[in-house]
Image (spheres, rainbow, N blue to C red):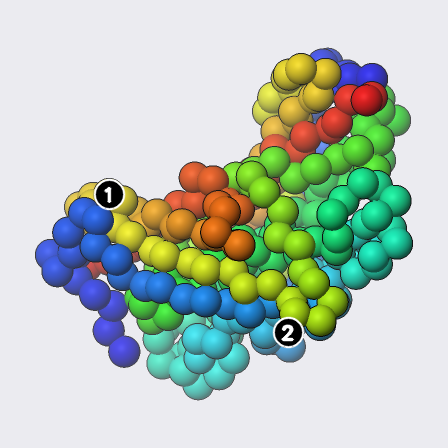
Amino acid sequence: MSAPALSSLALGDVVAEAELALTRDSLVRYAGASGDFNPIHYRDDVAASVGLPGVLAHGMLTMGLAVQPVVDWVGDPGRVVDYQVRFTRPVVVDPRDGAVVTVVAKVGRLDEDAARIDLTVTFGGETVLGKAQAVVRLEP
Amino acid sequence: MSVNPELQGRSYPPTAPYLVGREKVREFARAVFATNPLHHDVDAARAAGYADVVAPPTFPVVVQEHALARLLADPEADIDFSRVVHGDQRFSFSRPIVAGDELTATLTVTSVKSLGGHSMVTADALVADASGEHVVTATSTLVVRGDE
């Protein structure tokens, strides 16, 4: 599995797209794996008591899964040398229907040895992560 | 109630060493929908030049949390955890984390700002391996909501 060459990329190219379906089970799994047991991520009563519209996905779960289409595209998670996001809007996960998060990954900048991939991450038509950027190390 | 501005520049002692387990890497990878074989298959990871399975890019949060816990427990910081919202997050790697790494995190508060009744606290967790080499810097901004 070889990574794409920088010379094959142009600014604005869409390099990956994905629709990721979250359920409440996903939140419980992430709570256990990450150690973040804040009950707003699995208890409706607690979420309601602090004024939230429902149980929310962990921001770090949304961040974690949003980069996966990029990892699959480059074929090696070790090529991701920098990754940042701003948490702008919560992802409310319905107990029955879950939530579908959409990721579109585009080339935002090309350097000598790396490409910056800009992610547009949406839920229900609205952006949930701002300035979501992954820098991936690539050969010329 | 705003966060103590004197926190800016404060550092906390390194966290106790965190040993990255192979099954923990696999568990975390499954939790973030990471299906790349390098997260799961030791032979594939070794064939790609890694010592063991590779952790997903957001895995350092697990170690960072231990460091942030010190800030949140600092009575002088006076941060009400129930009012904390995660504002932004960044990971800057020197190299990827692999199973078998023994990691410590050293937290430094780089900025404390007030904005419209809220406080924004930015902290860098420098994550290093057992030989003291830098692995990743995890930077978080926590927004502490003011009284309504």
In the rendered view of the protein, which quadrant contains the C terminus of chain A?
bottom left
Report the side of A58 relative to B34 (left or right).
right
Residue in the image at 73% along x and 62% along y: A31
- Indicate whether A52 appears above or below B116: below
Mark 1: few/some/many CA within 10 Å (<14, 14-19, 20+): some
The residue drawn where x is 59% and y is 24% is: B110
Residue type at the position of mark 2: Glu
For this rendering, which residue is in front, A138 or B146? B146
Judge from the rendering whether residue B25 lies leftward or rightward of residue A73; answer left or right: right
Q: Position of residue B7 (x, y in %)?
A: 72, 20
Same chain for mark 2 and mark 1? The answer is no
Label 2 element class? helix
Judged from the image, the secondary structure of the residue bearing numbered disc 1 is strand
> At 67% from the left edge and 15% from the top edge, which residue is drawn?
B116
Residue that carries the numbered disc 1 in the rendered image: A109
Q: Could you tell whether B119 is left or right of A102 in the image?
A: right
Quadrant placement of the N terminus of chain A: bottom left
Query: A78 or A93, which lies in front?
Result: A93
**Rendered view: B130 above or below B113:** below
Which chain is disc 2 placed on? B
Q: Nearer the viewer, residue A132 or B130?
A: A132
